[in-house]
Protein backbone atom coordinates (compact mmCIF):
# COMPACT_ATOMS: atom_id res chain seq x y z
CA UNK A 1 0.00 0.00 0.00
CA UNK A 2 1.01 3.62 -0.52
CA UNK A 3 0.21 6.38 1.96
CA UNK A 4 -0.34 9.75 0.24
CA UNK A 5 -0.53 13.25 1.71
CA UNK A 6 -2.05 16.44 0.22
CA UNK A 7 -1.59 19.91 1.77
CA UNK A 8 -0.96 22.21 -1.20
CA UNK A 9 -3.65 24.72 -0.20
CA UNK A 10 -6.51 24.57 2.31
CA UNK A 11 -7.37 20.87 2.41
CA UNK A 12 -5.54 18.46 4.72
CA UNK A 13 -5.92 14.96 3.33
CA UNK A 14 -4.38 11.51 3.66
CA UNK A 15 -5.18 8.39 1.63
CA UNK A 16 -3.99 4.80 1.51
CA UNK A 17 -4.13 3.02 -1.86
CA UNK A 18 -3.50 -0.66 -2.55
CA UNK A 19 -0.79 -1.07 -5.18
CA UNK A 20 -2.02 -4.22 -6.97
CA UNK A 21 -5.74 -3.45 -7.08
CA UNK A 22 -5.65 0.42 -7.15
CA UNK A 23 -8.28 0.20 -4.39
CA UNK A 24 -8.68 3.13 -2.05
CA UNK A 25 -8.35 1.58 1.41
CA UNK A 26 -8.53 4.77 3.47
CA UNK A 27 -9.31 8.37 2.56
CA UNK A 28 -9.97 11.35 4.77
CA UNK A 29 -9.94 15.09 4.20
CA UNK A 30 -10.36 18.00 6.60
CA UNK A 31 -11.27 21.20 4.77
CA UNK A 32 -10.42 24.65 6.12
CA UNK A 33 -13.00 26.54 4.03
CA UNK A 34 -14.90 27.77 7.06
CA UNK A 35 -11.81 29.21 8.76
CA UNK A 36 -10.74 31.12 5.62
CA UNK A 37 -14.24 32.23 4.70
CA UNK A 38 -14.21 35.36 6.88
CA UNK A 39 -11.06 36.57 5.09
CA UNK A 40 -12.55 36.04 1.59
CA UNK A 41 -9.61 33.84 0.58
CA UNK A 42 -6.95 31.45 1.83
CA UNK A 43 -4.55 32.97 4.40
CA UNK A 44 -1.36 30.91 3.92
CA UNK A 45 -0.05 31.18 7.52
CA UNK A 46 -3.42 30.18 8.95
CA UNK A 47 -3.67 27.32 6.45
CA UNK A 48 -0.25 26.00 7.50
CA UNK A 49 -1.22 26.10 11.21
CA UNK A 50 -4.44 24.25 10.48
CA UNK A 51 -2.52 21.54 8.58
CA UNK A 52 -0.30 21.13 11.65
CA UNK A 53 -3.44 20.28 13.64
CA UNK A 54 -5.33 18.26 11.03
CA UNK A 55 -2.70 16.04 9.40
CA UNK A 56 -1.61 14.20 12.61
CA UNK A 57 -5.28 13.70 13.52
CA UNK A 58 -5.92 11.93 10.20
CA UNK A 59 -2.66 9.99 10.43
CA UNK A 60 -3.70 8.58 13.83
CA UNK A 61 -6.76 7.08 12.13
CA UNK A 62 -4.81 5.02 9.60
CA UNK A 63 -1.93 3.77 11.78
CA UNK A 64 -3.16 0.20 11.50
CA UNK A 65 -2.01 0.12 7.84
CA UNK A 66 1.57 1.20 8.55
CA UNK A 67 3.01 -2.36 8.50
CA UNK A 68 1.65 -2.82 4.96
CA UNK A 69 3.11 0.39 3.50
CA UNK A 70 5.62 0.24 0.65
CA UNK A 71 6.03 3.99 -0.01
CA UNK A 72 5.05 7.46 1.19
CA UNK A 73 3.77 9.93 -1.43
CA UNK A 74 3.25 13.66 -1.01
CA UNK A 75 2.30 16.69 -3.11
CA UNK A 76 5.45 18.83 -3.39
CA UNK A 77 4.38 21.26 -6.18
CA UNK A 78 2.71 23.53 -7.16
CA UNK A 79 0.94 25.20 -4.25
CA UNK A 80 1.48 27.49 -1.28
CA UNK A 81 5.01 26.93 0.00
CA UNK A 82 4.13 27.12 3.71
CA UNK A 83 1.30 24.60 3.37
CA UNK A 84 3.18 22.24 1.02
CA UNK A 85 5.94 22.23 3.62
CA UNK A 86 3.61 20.74 6.26
CA UNK A 87 2.72 17.69 4.15
CA UNK A 88 6.29 17.27 2.94
CA UNK A 89 7.69 17.45 6.49
CA UNK A 90 5.26 14.76 7.63
CA UNK A 91 6.13 12.61 4.60
CA UNK A 92 9.86 12.98 5.28
CA UNK A 93 9.41 11.91 8.90
CA UNK A 94 7.33 8.87 7.88
CA UNK A 95 9.78 7.90 5.17
CA UNK A 96 12.73 8.01 7.57
CA UNK A 97 11.02 6.36 10.54
CA UNK A 98 9.35 3.59 8.51
CA UNK A 99 12.33 3.24 6.18
CA UNK A 100 10.21 3.68 3.04
CA UNK A 101 10.89 5.38 -0.30
CA UNK A 102 9.38 8.80 -0.88
CA UNK A 103 7.35 9.79 -3.97
CA UNK A 104 7.05 13.50 -4.88
CA UNK A 105 3.76 14.14 -6.71
CA UNK A 106 2.79 17.02 -9.01
CA UNK A 107 -0.55 18.36 -7.75
CA UNK A 108 -1.83 19.03 -11.28
CA UNK A 109 -1.13 15.44 -12.33
CA UNK A 110 -3.13 14.59 -9.23
CA UNK A 111 -6.15 16.49 -10.57
CA UNK A 112 -5.80 14.63 -13.89
CA UNK A 113 -5.59 11.27 -12.13
CA UNK A 114 -8.69 12.10 -10.07
CA UNK A 115 -10.40 10.71 -13.19
CA UNK A 116 -8.78 7.33 -12.65
CA UNK A 117 -9.25 6.69 -8.93
CA UNK A 118 -9.86 2.93 -8.53
CA UNK A 119 -9.86 2.76 -12.36
CA UNK A 120 -7.51 2.20 -15.28
CA UNK A 121 -6.31 5.33 -17.02
CA UNK A 122 -7.62 6.39 -20.42
CA UNK A 123 -5.14 7.96 -22.83
CA UNK A 124 -4.93 9.93 -25.04
CA UNK A 125 -7.36 12.45 -23.52
CA UNK A 126 -7.72 16.20 -23.94
CA UNK A 127 -8.15 17.63 -20.46
CA UNK A 128 -9.57 20.93 -19.26
CA UNK A 129 -8.10 21.62 -15.82
CA UNK A 130 -9.96 24.32 -13.91
CA UNK A 131 -8.99 24.99 -10.31
CA UNK A 132 -8.30 27.87 -7.96
CA UNK A 133 -4.74 28.15 -9.24
CA UNK A 134 -4.95 26.94 -12.85
CA UNK A 135 -6.89 27.06 -16.09
CA UNK A 136 -5.25 24.80 -18.63
CA UNK A 137 -5.99 22.61 -21.59
CA UNK A 138 -3.69 19.61 -21.56
CA UNK A 139 -3.07 16.95 -24.19
CA UNK A 140 -2.41 13.85 -22.09
CA UNK A 141 -0.97 11.03 -24.20
CA UNK A 142 0.44 8.94 -21.35
CA UNK A 143 1.64 9.39 -17.79
CA UNK A 144 4.95 10.84 -18.98
CA UNK A 145 3.77 12.55 -22.13
CA UNK A 146 1.54 15.51 -21.42
CA UNK A 147 1.57 18.86 -23.15
CA UNK A 148 -0.04 22.11 -22.01
CA UNK A 149 -1.93 23.49 -25.03
CA UNK A 150 -3.41 26.55 -23.32
CA UNK A 151 -3.12 28.36 -20.03
CA UNK A 152 -4.22 31.60 -18.38
CA UNK A 153 -2.23 34.79 -18.70
CA UNK A 154 -3.50 36.13 -15.35
CA UNK A 155 -6.24 34.86 -13.00
CA UNK A 156 -7.69 31.36 -13.16
CA UNK A 157 -11.33 30.38 -13.72
CA UNK A 158 -11.89 29.30 -10.09
CA UNK A 159 -9.98 32.29 -8.74
CA UNK A 160 -12.26 34.68 -10.65
CA UNK A 161 -15.27 33.17 -8.85
CA UNK A 162 -13.42 33.62 -5.54
CA UNK A 163 -12.67 37.27 -6.35
CA UNK A 164 -16.22 38.07 -7.45
CA UNK A 165 -17.54 36.46 -4.25
CA UNK A 166 -15.08 38.53 -2.20
CA UNK A 167 -16.19 41.77 -3.91
CA UNK A 168 -19.79 40.89 -3.11
CA UNK A 169 -18.94 39.88 0.48
CA UNK A 170 -20.15 36.32 -0.09
CA UNK A 171 -17.27 34.45 1.59
CA UNK A 172 -14.86 31.75 0.37
CA UNK A 173 -14.69 29.61 -1.73
CA UNK A 174 -16.56 31.69 -4.26
CA UNK A 175 -17.37 29.01 -6.85
CA UNK A 176 -20.25 27.23 -5.11
CA UNK A 177 -21.71 30.49 -3.66
CA UNK A 178 -21.59 32.42 -6.95
CA UNK A 179 -23.11 29.40 -8.73
CA UNK A 180 -25.94 29.20 -6.20
CA UNK A 181 -26.71 32.93 -6.34
CA UNK A 182 -26.50 32.81 -10.13
CA UNK A 183 -29.26 30.21 -10.26
CA UNK A 184 -31.64 32.88 -8.91
CA UNK A 185 -30.34 35.63 -11.19
CA UNK A 186 -30.88 37.02 -14.69
CA UNK A 187 -27.83 36.09 -16.79
CA UNK A 188 -28.72 38.71 -19.42
CA UNK A 189 -29.00 41.72 -17.11
CA UNK A 190 -25.33 42.73 -17.32
CA UNK A 191 -23.40 42.49 -20.55
CA UNK A 192 -19.86 41.68 -19.42
CA UNK A 193 -17.38 41.39 -22.32
CA UNK A 194 -16.12 37.88 -23.09
CA UNK A 195 -12.32 38.03 -22.58
CA UNK A 196 -9.91 37.75 -25.54
CA UNK A 197 -12.81 37.36 -27.94
CA UNK A 198 -10.87 38.75 -30.91
CA UNK A 199 -7.55 37.14 -30.05
CA UNK A 200 -6.55 34.20 -32.27
CA UNK A 201 -4.52 32.70 -29.40
CA UNK A 202 -5.80 29.79 -27.39
CA UNK A 203 -5.24 31.26 -23.94
CA UNK A 204 -7.34 32.46 -21.03
CA UNK A 205 -7.63 35.71 -19.11
CA UNK A 206 -9.95 36.53 -16.21
CA UNK A 207 -8.62 39.80 -14.78
CA UNK A 208 -10.49 42.00 -17.28
CA UNK A 209 -13.79 40.26 -16.53
CA UNK A 210 -13.15 40.64 -12.80
CA UNK A 211 -12.59 44.37 -13.29
CA UNK A 212 -15.77 44.73 -15.36
CA UNK A 213 -17.68 43.07 -12.51
CA UNK A 214 -15.99 45.36 -9.97
CA UNK A 215 -17.00 48.48 -11.94
CA UNK A 216 -20.59 47.22 -12.14
CA UNK A 217 -20.69 46.53 -8.39
CA UNK A 218 -19.35 50.04 -7.67
CA UNK A 219 -22.07 51.55 -9.89
CA UNK A 220 -24.78 49.61 -8.08
CA UNK A 221 -23.33 50.47 -4.69
CA UNK A 222 -23.93 54.16 -5.37
CA UNK A 223 -27.54 53.27 -4.61
CA UNK A 224 -28.16 50.26 -2.39
CA UNK A 225 -27.18 46.89 -3.85
CA UNK A 226 -30.06 44.42 -3.51
CA UNK A 227 -30.06 40.63 -3.20
CA UNK A 228 -31.50 40.47 -6.73
CA UNK A 229 -28.64 42.68 -8.04
CA UNK A 230 -26.14 40.24 -6.47
CA UNK A 231 -27.85 37.23 -8.06
CA UNK A 232 -27.96 38.98 -11.46
CA UNK A 233 -24.26 39.86 -11.25
CA UNK A 234 -23.40 36.26 -10.36
CA UNK A 235 -25.47 34.85 -13.23
CA UNK A 236 -24.12 37.34 -15.81
CA UNK A 237 -20.53 36.84 -14.63
CA UNK A 238 -20.79 33.03 -14.65
CA UNK A 239 -22.32 33.04 -18.13
CA UNK A 240 -19.38 35.13 -19.44
CA UNK A 241 -16.72 33.13 -17.55
CA UNK A 242 -18.00 29.89 -19.10
CA UNK A 243 -18.48 31.49 -22.56
CA UNK A 244 -14.77 32.43 -22.51
CA UNK A 245 -13.71 28.83 -21.91
CA UNK A 246 -16.13 27.52 -24.52
CA UNK A 247 -14.96 29.99 -27.20
CA UNK A 248 -11.34 28.90 -26.71
CA UNK A 249 -12.19 25.19 -26.57
CA UNK A 250 -14.18 25.51 -29.80
CA UNK A 251 -11.34 27.42 -31.45
CA UNK A 252 -8.87 24.72 -30.43
CA UNK A 253 -11.00 21.94 -31.87
CA UNK A 254 -11.16 23.66 -35.26
CA UNK A 255 -7.64 22.38 -35.84
CA UNK A 256 -7.53 19.24 -33.74
CA UNK A 257 -9.62 16.23 -32.84
CA UNK A 258 -9.77 13.89 -29.89
CA UNK A 259 -11.70 10.78 -28.94
CA UNK A 260 -11.81 11.65 -25.25
CA UNK A 261 -12.32 14.85 -23.33
CA UNK A 262 -12.22 15.38 -19.57
CA UNK A 263 -12.74 18.21 -17.08
CA UNK A 264 -10.85 18.10 -13.77
CA UNK A 265 -10.05 20.40 -10.83
CA UNK A 266 -12.12 21.99 -8.08
CA UNK A 267 -13.98 24.30 -10.48
CA UNK A 268 -15.02 21.36 -12.68
CA UNK A 269 -17.90 21.08 -10.21
CA UNK A 270 -19.43 24.08 -12.00
CA UNK A 271 -22.78 22.96 -13.43
CA UNK A 272 -22.91 25.50 -16.26
CA UNK A 273 -19.41 24.59 -17.42
CA UNK A 274 -20.15 20.87 -17.19
CA UNK A 275 -23.28 21.12 -19.31
CA UNK A 276 -21.66 23.41 -21.92
CA UNK A 277 -18.78 20.95 -22.30
CA UNK A 278 -21.21 18.02 -22.38
CA UNK A 279 -23.09 19.65 -25.28
CA UNK A 280 -19.85 20.38 -27.12
CA UNK A 281 -18.56 16.82 -26.71
CA UNK A 282 -21.82 15.50 -28.19
CA UNK A 283 -21.39 17.64 -31.31
CA UNK A 284 -17.80 16.40 -31.71
CA UNK A 285 -18.64 12.78 -30.83
CA UNK A 286 -16.08 12.84 -28.03
CA UNK A 287 -16.54 10.76 -24.90
CA UNK A 288 -16.59 13.02 -21.87
CA UNK A 289 -15.00 11.95 -18.58
CA UNK A 290 -15.67 13.73 -15.31
CA UNK A 291 -14.16 12.95 -11.95
CA UNK A 292 -16.60 12.17 -9.18
CA UNK A 293 -17.65 15.37 -7.40
CA UNK A 294 -15.96 14.26 -4.15
CA UNK A 295 -12.63 13.99 -6.04
CA UNK A 296 -12.90 17.32 -7.94
CA UNK A 297 -11.45 19.47 -5.17
CA UNK A 298 -8.07 18.81 -3.56
CA UNK A 299 -7.69 15.37 -2.01
CA UNK A 300 -5.04 12.76 -1.24
CA UNK A 301 -6.80 9.95 -3.15
CA UNK A 302 -5.81 11.54 -6.47
CA UNK A 303 -2.22 11.98 -5.21
CA UNK A 304 -2.17 8.29 -4.26
CA UNK A 305 -3.41 7.35 -7.75
CA UNK A 306 -0.51 9.24 -9.37
CA UNK A 307 1.88 7.68 -6.86
CA UNK A 308 0.87 4.18 -8.06
CA UNK A 309 2.30 5.02 -11.49
CA UNK A 310 5.47 6.52 -10.04
CA UNK A 311 5.89 3.48 -7.75
CA UNK A 312 5.71 1.14 -10.78
CA UNK A 313 8.30 3.30 -12.57
CA UNK A 314 10.47 3.40 -9.39
CA UNK A 315 10.32 7.18 -9.56
CA UNK A 316 11.45 7.77 -5.97
CA UNK A 317 13.09 10.62 -4.10
CA UNK A 318 14.50 10.84 -0.58
CA UNK A 319 13.85 12.90 2.55
CA UNK A 320 17.14 14.66 1.87
CA UNK A 321 16.36 15.53 -1.75
CA UNK A 322 12.65 16.37 -1.88
CA UNK A 323 11.90 20.06 -2.27
CA UNK A 324 8.80 22.22 -2.35
CA UNK A 325 7.97 24.32 -5.42
CA UNK A 326 5.31 27.03 -5.49
CA UNK A 327 5.27 27.10 -9.28
CA UNK A 328 6.37 24.72 -12.02
CA UNK A 329 7.76 25.62 -15.42
O1 LIG B 1 -8.88 22.21 -7.18
P1 LIG B 1 -9.26 23.04 -6.02
O2 LIG B 1 -9.96 22.39 -4.86
O3 LIG B 1 -8.03 23.79 -5.44
C1 LIG B 1 -6.96 24.21 -6.22
O4 LIG B 1 -6.09 23.37 -6.53
O5 LIG B 1 -6.99 25.41 -6.58
O6 LIG B 1 -10.19 24.22 -6.61
C2 LIG B 1 -10.75 25.19 -5.80
C3 LIG B 1 -11.35 26.25 -6.70
C4 LIG B 1 -11.79 27.49 -5.95
O7 LIG B 1 -11.34 28.62 -6.66
C5 LIG B 1 -13.32 27.39 -5.99
O8 LIG B 1 -13.98 28.63 -5.94
C6 LIG B 1 -13.52 26.70 -7.32
O9 LIG B 1 -12.51 25.73 -7.38
N1 LIG B 1 -14.85 26.07 -7.40
C7 LIG B 1 -15.79 26.45 -8.32
C8 LIG B 1 -16.95 25.67 -8.05
N2 LIG B 1 -16.67 24.84 -6.99
C9 LIG B 1 -15.37 25.11 -6.62
N3 LIG B 1 -15.74 27.37 -9.30
C10 LIG B 1 -16.86 27.53 -10.05
N4 LIG B 1 -18.00 26.84 -9.85
C11 LIG B 1 -18.09 25.90 -8.87
N5 LIG B 1 -19.22 25.21 -8.69
ZN1 LIG C 1 -6.03 21.64 -6.69
Image: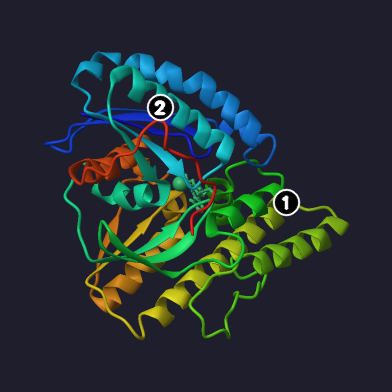
Q: Is residue 176 above or below residue 287?
A: above
Q: Earlier in the sequence, mark 2 or mark 1?
A: 2
Decide: few, some or many residues near mark 1? Use Cα within 10 Å; few <14, some 14-19, many ≥20.
some
Tell me the SS state at disc 2: helix
Q: Position of residue 51 (x, y in %)?
A: 52, 26
The kind of secondary structure element at disc 1 is helix
Q: Residue at x 23, y 18 (%)?
A: 65
Which numbered circle lies on residue 92? 2
Residue occupying image coordinates x 29% and y 19%: 98
Q: Is residue 298 visible?
A: no
Dot 2 and dot 1 residues touching (CB under 8 Å): no
100 and 2: which is toward the camera = 100
Q: Which residue is more in the foreground, 35 or 68?
A: 68
Q: Position of residue 39 (x, y in %)?
A: 70, 37
* Distance (Cα) linking label 2 and label 1: 40 Å
Label 2 crowding class (10 Å Cα cut-off): few <14, some 14-19, many 20+?
many
Q: Is the shortest distance between ligand 1 and the CB of mark 1 under 8 Å? A: no
Residue 160: image location, x then y, percent: 61, 57
Instruction: Specify the farthest residue to the front.
Output: 320
Q: Which residue is mark 1?
A: 167
- Lateral position of residue 251 relative to residue 258, left or right: right
Q: Which residue in the rendered view is the most extreme toward the right?
A: 222
Give the number of the mark in front: 2 or 1.
2
Q: What's the mark number on residue 4?
A: none
Instruction: From the top left corner, tell me how far across and down residue 53 is, in percent.
Output: 52, 19
Which quarter of the figure has residue 88? top left
Is the CB–ligand 2 distance for label 2 below 8 Å?
A: no
Amino acid sequence: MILSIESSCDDSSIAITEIETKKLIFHKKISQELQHSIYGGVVPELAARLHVEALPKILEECKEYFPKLKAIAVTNAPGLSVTLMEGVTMAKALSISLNLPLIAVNHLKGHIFSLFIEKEEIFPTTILLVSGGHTQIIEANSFDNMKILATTIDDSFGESFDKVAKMLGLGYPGGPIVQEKGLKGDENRFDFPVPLRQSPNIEFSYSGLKNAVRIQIEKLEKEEISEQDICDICASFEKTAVAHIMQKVKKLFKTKSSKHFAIVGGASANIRLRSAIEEFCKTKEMTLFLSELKYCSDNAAMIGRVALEQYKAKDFTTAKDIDVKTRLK
